[in-house]
Image (spheres, rainbow, N blue to C red):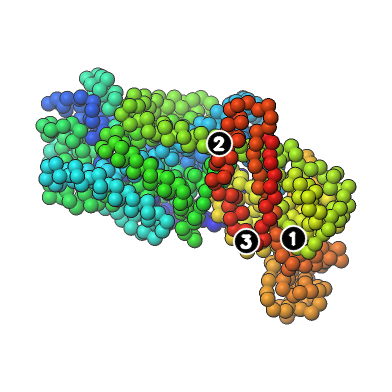
Amino acid sequence: MDLEGGQRVGVPGKRRESWGASLLLAYQSLGVVYGDVATSPLYVYKSAFAGNDIQHSAGNEEIYGVLSFVFWTLTLISLVKYVLIVLRADDGGEGGTFALYSLICRHVRVGLLPGGGTGDELTAGGKCAGRRDARPMSRSRAVLERYRVLQRLLLLFALLGTCMVIGDGVLTPAVSVFSAVSGLELSMEKEHHKYVELPVTCAILIALFALQHYGTHRVGFLFAPIVCIWLLCISTIGVYNIVHWNHHVYRALSPYYMYQFLKKTQTGGWMSLGGILLCVTGSEAMYADLGHFSQSSIKIAFMSMVYPALVLAYMGQAAYISQHHSFENTYHIGFYVSVPEKLRWPVLVIAILAAVVGSQAIITGTFSIIKQCSSLSCFPGVKIVHTSSTVHGQIYIPEINWILMILCLAVTLGFRNTKHLANAQGLAVITVMLVTTCLMSLVIVLCWNKSIFLALGFLLFFGTIEVLYFSASLVKFHEGAWVPITLSFIFMIVMCVWHYGTIKKYEFDFQNKVSVNWLLNLGPSLGIVRVRGIGLIHTDLVSGIPAIFSHFVTNLPAFHQVLVFLCVKSVPVPHVQPEERFLVGRIGPKEYRLYRVIIRYGYRDVQKDDLEFEKDLVSSIAEFIRGGGSDHNGVLEDTEKSCEKLSSISNGIPLCEEDGELVESASPHKDTNNTQVVAANRKKARFTLPKNAQLDSEVHRELQELVDAREAGMSFILGHSYMKAKSGSSFVKRIVINFFYEFLRRNSRGPSYAANIPHASTLEVGMVYQV
């Protein structure tokens, strides 16, 4: 797997791997991807029969009907929809709800994100906008690109799915761990378990979240064996129950029993669908965790081990229940009643471990999706800690971790049973699946260029099934289903406010940028004192002069001898290859020593530390100068075509920095390594050029000034903006901008690159944005 470089910008990569590699990844995926879906037998039957007043008859139509629903739901949703179809819709190897939206944005101009799909997006080779399909524009694509309201609805739809995934990150640990611990009620004396279950569940949840900062890689080697043992355990118990209690249970796999179940139970049977759908919880994780593995490995693991084990487990439980109708309460129809009494304690321990693994997977997935949203300006900045030096996807976000823990403990202590927790989780799960189905139908038409009838068939078939389950979950609003709605509403408000404020800030920057003519009229000295050093001015603009520059020089008429307008862009693709990361251009004539550098990161890329970042930046500018950048005496005009004059720098000139003396002369010469060197007078930095490289006097002079400026030091000028709604704005806009957005801005992290900048070299320039 390519964990560092990533895919080419705008071009999804296809990786070929051997069978051995696929099998190894399939084994590893068991511990990361399938922990959630593997633990669903703990609570599916209990949730299906809880509170629905379904009486068990001697003919077992009820239990057979539930088993039939479970089997066909698992087959159609998890196997057919996700494994065989949705997994193919990867965005450069990445999956998930936001990856689907990103994939659509790269093929159709529907992006509403700053710098991504609005004409400002930069992809490989310095071209403007993303690489889009060259085929004739379809009617559906034309309609989507024409109407702005449809684009906003599409973004809101993607954010809804994202918010529900975050809600699932709150509910899944609570449901999984509580259901596993509930086995104590059959392993302890009556009434005693009530005083043990809740404290044990809370203690496990606190430990689970407290250990997140160590990273999954430290205990990851335990995950796959635990899930393997768990799957082997439930499948073996399932086979035992089928053989020992009811070997005719296979008849329930016929769809006929679903019809009989709904006909006999009517409203109660329909409401039980809200619990039955929990058999596919965790299916979305197969798609969301696609970036960690591969399509073939996930398919192999699910089809060869997970799917057969789950079917045997559900059949075994049904076989046991079909012969045991006399329960004290239908709510007690759970997993542990079908486990032989002598095995309950060992199975309880394995179940708790498997529940922790399943919870770990959804927590890590929540971290990843928050990072994606933050990278694409849809979530406030948060601190992202990379817990693995080799696997970029293993991250830890402290603020989100503790928020998830508090919310998870709150719903656990508030509901105190798995019935309401399962109702809440069910609505979150089915909502995400509905969003995926709708976005996937757009991918079939817009990205795969298939017939619209095929897309409608996909939407109607799977959408009808999921709407049926959605209605059964929504009717339980007062019994716990309100939780994911409330959580998603809160997160949606945060995302929308942050996105709206970011868009307004970007529009202010774009509308108030300074023209290049103003710069040219100042002359080479820019009308100010030029001091030694490199000044990096951070801006969100890819063209023109940011207003922060004129604001600065107007109040303090001095600046560095080399000025670099630096724009760090998060483009809506998973990864940007290092050789396509830097775009370098010149602003004005060469004697001005003004450069523009655009650095592109995918939403799954890891940004470098400050020292390595600075060296790469200077090396890229040097390569631009050596490669003919000095010949571009024209200005970088304020047009959309301006990005055509930016050069993609694949490999910068190596920059060597030492404390000792290097050479006596500042002119190019050959050293003992038979390479040409451009050295500075202070002999602390040098560029190592290719052998026999020819430099004219103008290029040499410009490189010399760059080295001198590098030795003198590098300063970072950051804009510190304060947003304020302009006079005459509506009341709602004033509330959103002046209070909500400003509150989020003050309590969020700055850009990730700003966190790595040395404080002694940082200068913040404050500006008030009237939007």
For numbered disc 2, what is the local secondary structure? helix
Left/right placement of residue 400 relative to residue 36 reads right
Out of 305 and 150, give the one closest to the viewer.
150
- What x and y, as percent, mark residue 545? 77, 46
Mark 1 or mark 3, which is nearer to you?
3
Q: In which quarter of the image is residue 38?
A: top left
| Mark before the other along the chain sequence, 3 or 2 | 2
Mark 2 or mark 1, which is nearer to you?
2
- What x and y, as percent, mark residue 427? 37, 31
Q: Which residue in the structure is indicated by mark 3?
A: 758
Q: Distance between the residues labelled 1 and 3?
A: 14 Å
Q: Do the CB atoms of the residues marked 1 and 3 lie less than 8 Å apart?
A: no
For numbered disc 1, what is the local secondary structure? strand
> How many numbered discs?
3
Q: Residues within 10 Å of mark 2 (few under 14, many from 20)?
A: some
Q: What residue type is labelled 2?
A: Phe
Q: Do the CB atoms of the residues marked 2 and 1 lie less than 8 Å apart?
A: no
Q: What residue type is labelled 1?
A: Ile
Q: Residues within 10 Å of mark 3 (few under 14, many from 20)?
A: few
> Is residue 82 visible to us here?
no
Instruction: Name the residue: 27% across, 34% down.
Output: 419
Q: How far apart are marks 3 and 2 (CA)?
A: 30 Å
Q: Which residue in the structure is indicated by mark 2?
A: 740
- What x and y, as percent, mark residue 634? 85, 49
Establish if 150 lies above or below 83: above
Instruction: Name the residue: 22% across, 20% down.
Output: 264
Q: What residue type is labelled 3?
A: Pro
For numbered disc 3, what is the local secondary structure? loop
Instruction: Name the residue: 33% across, 58% down.
Output: 222
Q: Which residue in the structure is indicated by mark 1?
A: 534
